[in-house]
């Protein structure tokens, strides 16, 4: 292809044009994908904030029967009952402040009910020795806890096929956590959602405070980078393929 523009000539090679077109479209697609991710994060954060300002729900058997799970996600809740301390689940490969550790999950039976919810009680360190069991809190009797309702976690790296390890009679370490698997391990029928203890709640471990940022700015930054790559690629393509015609002044 050859195009004359006054004293300039635009004469790119076919292969160069095809490669440039492919990468230009790729960079634009990645940029728009990041914009879409930013919008998702913005929407999720707005949903979270709307749920958080609502009054806390007293989680009991009547609420469990009448309220849909989707209506509880990210709602603040209070619950009265007792931890089933004979069942401790450690979710492996969790990092906090640069240290390796576990999230500790314990079933919690609601008072005067057969309803049992799995509770994320926070993070504990491995103390740089995975052969040792972490020192866990033993809470007896009826207690009150507060936190937020979350869907099944999507954390956990599956590094081996045998990802369930029995560390003791009461402690099981897993690399991936699903409610169905925990129910199978503990032989307990669990409610289809997780309760995460609030940072102020007792009876737990180190707990991360929820960030008030939506995280959309990170994706916006990536989007601008991809668009910048596309513009830079186009500029380079034009510069190396536009030349002065012979004899032009």
Image (cartoon, rainbow, N blue to C red):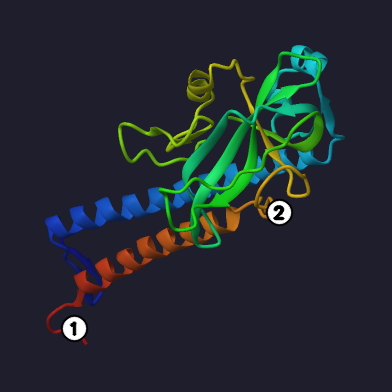
Left or right: residue 223 versus residue 27 is right
Q: Residues within 10 Å of mark 1 (few under 14, many from 20)?
A: few
Left or right: residue 52 versus residue 211 is right
Q: Position of residue 56 (x, y in %)?
A: 84, 34
Residue name at image x 24 percent, y 58 percent: 20
Q: Position of residue 58 (x, y in %)?
A: 84, 27
Q: Which residue is mark 1?
A: 248
The front one of 36 and 107 is 107
Residue name at image x 50 percent, y 40 percent: 91
Q: Position of residue 129 (x, y in %)?
A: 43, 54
Q: Secondary structure at mark 1?
A: loop
**Quadrant including the N terminus:** bottom left
The front one of 96 and 88 is 88
Is 131 situated above or below 165? below
Q: CA distance from mark 1 to mark 2?
A: 61 Å
Residue 102 disc label: none
Q: Position of residue 87 (x, y in %)?
A: 58, 28
The front one of 73 and 24 is 73
Is 3 situated above or below 183? below
Is 46 situated above or below 17? above
* Picture quadrant of residue 231: bottom left
**Quadrant including the C terminus:** bottom left
Residue name at image x 78 percent, y 36 percent: 145
The front one of 115 and 1 is 115
Residue 212 disc label: 2
Which one is earlier in the sequence, the residue at label 1 or at label 2? 2
């Amino acid at each position: 292809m050859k195009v004359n523009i006054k004293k300039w000539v635009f004469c790119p090679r076919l292969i160069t044009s095809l490669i440039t077109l492919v990468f230009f479209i790729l960079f634009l697609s990645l940029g728009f994908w990041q914009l879409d991710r930013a919008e998702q994060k913005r929407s999720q954060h707005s949903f979270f904030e709307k749920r958080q300002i609502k009054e806390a729900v007293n989680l009991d058997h009547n609420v469990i029967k009448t309220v849909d799970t989707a209506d509880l996600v990210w709602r603040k809740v209070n619950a009265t009952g007792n931890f089933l301390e004979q069942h401790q689940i450690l979710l492996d490969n969790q990092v906090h402040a640069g240290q390796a550790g576990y999230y500790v999950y314990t079933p919690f039976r609601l008072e005067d009910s057969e309803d049992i919810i799995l509770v994320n009680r926070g993070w504990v360190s491995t103390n740089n020795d995975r052969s040792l069991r972490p020192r866990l809190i033993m809470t007896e009797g009826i207690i009150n806890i507060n936190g937020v309702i979350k869907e099944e976690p999507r954390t956990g790296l599956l590094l081996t096929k045998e990802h369930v390890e029995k560390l003791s009679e009461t402690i099981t370490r897993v690399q991936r956590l699903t409610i169905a698997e925990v129910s199978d391990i503990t032989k307990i029928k669990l409610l289809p959602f997780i309760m995460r203890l609030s940072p102020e709640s007792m009876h737990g471990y180190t707990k991360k405070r929820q960030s008030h940022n939506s995280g959309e700015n990170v994706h916006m930054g990536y989007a601008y980078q991809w668009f910048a790559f596309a513009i830079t690629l186009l500029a380079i393509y034009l510069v190396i393929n536009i030349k002065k015609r012979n004899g032009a002044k």
